[in-house]
């Protein structure tokens, strides 16, 4: 997966199309990422007794890795990323402006 935690990403499909946010969590096994402010989901927690009416919790549900694109910090555009080897380290590069992204 080319996306890393704290990357700024843009949503490329679905109800949050065009939204931007920071990646807060990466779920490698599911190929999903959690993006701050994106895919807000409300879950109703059932009440446990008659005094408790239950409550709602809001959280940001994971989105598919293929539905987000990293925003390049250099050219500020959402771009596909590639890899190149620099000083024997594999680094990510923006395919639009060729800047190295860390
Ligand atoms: Zn770029």
Image (cartoon, grey):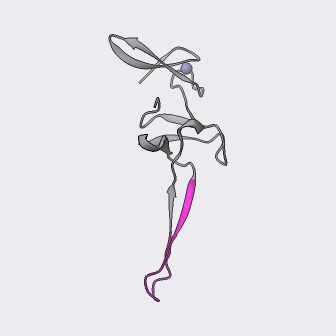
Residue 6 vs residue 80, the one in the foreground: 80
Q: Where residue 41 sits in the image (x, y, percent)?
A: 56, 58
Q: Where residue 36 sits in the image (x, y, percent)?
A: 50, 47
Q: Is residue 43 above or below residue 19?
A: below
Residue 31 vs residue 83, the one in the foreground: 31
Question: Does residue 9 appear left or right of residue 85 in this picture?
Answer: right
Seen at 54% across and 49% down, the residue is: 37
Whether residue 25 is visible here, answered yes or no, is: no
Seen at 53% across and 25% down, the residue is: 72
Q: Where residue 21 sits in the image (x, y, percent)?
A: 53, 41
Whether residue 5 is visible here, answered yes or no, is: yes
* Residue extending furthest toward the bottom: 50
Q: Quadrant of the C terminus?
A: top left
Q: Quadrant of residue 84?
A: top left
Q: Which residues are magenta?
A: 40-56
State yes or no: residue 46 in magenta.
yes
């Amino acid at each position: 997966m080319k996306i890393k935690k704290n990357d700024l990403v843009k949503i490329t499909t679905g109800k949050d199309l065009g939204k931007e946010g920071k990646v807060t969590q990466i779920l490698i096994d599911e190929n999903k990422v959690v993006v701050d402010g994106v895919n807000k989901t409300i879950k109703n927690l059932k009440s446990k007794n008659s005094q408790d009416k239950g409550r709602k919790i809001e959280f940001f549900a994971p989105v598919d890795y293929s539905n987000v694109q990293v925003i390049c910090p250099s050219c500020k555009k959402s771009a596909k990323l590639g890899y190149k080897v620099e000083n024997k380290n594999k680094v990510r590069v923006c395919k639009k402006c060729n800047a190295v992204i860390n």
